[in-house]
Amino acid sequence: MRVFLNGKEVASSNVNWSAYSRRNFPFQLRQDPGPDNALGRIKFIFPNEFNIYIHDTPTKSLFNRAQRDFSHGCIRVAKPFDLGDVLLSPEGYSKGKLEKIRDGQKRTVIKLNKPLKVHLTYLTAWMNKDGSTHFRRDIYSRDAVLLKALREAMVKNL
């Protein structure tokens, strides 16, 4: 972990941590990208009020599970450099160029010249084209709100 104060890195050993609380914590903490970082080696930040982003993961085995809520609201991607190739190729970044940046071990921020719109859909039930139906736990407790709204709409239309 690296510690920053007003954008400048400070040695964590020089900080009197007991002098700070949640209310007066002036530092920014950052773990650089890498194989041990929970966000993996690359993340894609997009504007949203919830600080949600798309990111790599060092635990690729989690993609073999049906449960998907391991990222505390963020979105893990199985093949982040393939995604980067699609998103960043108009900016002149190929998958190979991104992998070269990754292997260089230097933190790099790439901003899009033309913003890309991101739309997230939260589903707890869906049906595939083959007719198979899937259900997942409602980890954000939104189904009850939706069900209430649907019932109210049905009553109005009777």
Image: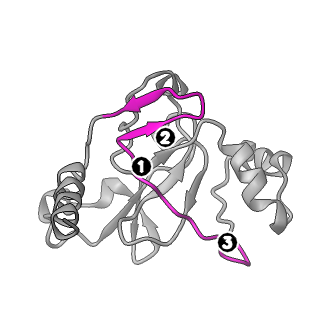
Dot 2 amino acid type: Asn
Labelled disc at residue 37: 2
Labelled disc at residue 45: none
Residue located at (71% from left, 44% from top): 81
Between discs 2 and 1, the one toward the N terminus: 1
Residue 6 percent coordinates (x, y):
40, 78
Q: Nearer the viewer, mark 3 or mark 2?
A: 3
Could you say which is closer to the camera, residue 52 or residue 23?
52
Q: Are marks 3 and 2 in contact (CB under 8 Å)?
A: no
Residue 25 percent coordinates (x, y):
22, 69
Between discs 3 and 1, the one toward the N terminus: 1
Determine the image quadrant of residue 99: top right
Q: Nearer the viewer, mark 3 or mark 1?
A: 3
Measured along the vertical axis of the image, is residue 111 above or below residue 39? below
Verify whether residue 118 appears in magenta.
yes
Dot 3 amino acid type: Lys
Q: Are marks 3 and 1 in contact (CB under 8 Å)?
A: no
- Find disc 3 in the rendering and name its residue: 111
Measured along the vertical axis of the image, is residue 132 above or below residue 107? above
Q: Are marks 2 and 1 in contact (CB under 8 Å)?
A: no
**Helix or strand or loop: what does disc 3 sit on?**
loop
**Helix or strand or loop: what does disc 2 sit on?**
loop
Residue located at (70% from left, 72% from top): 112
Dot 1 amino acid type: Met
Specify the color scheme.
Answer: one colour
Is 36 left or right of 87, judged from the image as shown?
A: left
Distance in Å between CA atoms under marks 3 and 2: 22 Å
Between discs 3 and 2, the one toward the N terminus: 2
Distance in Å between CA atoms under marks 3 and 1: 24 Å
- Tell me where the magenta segment starts and ends, as one range: 111-136
Verify whether residue 150 appears in magenta.
no
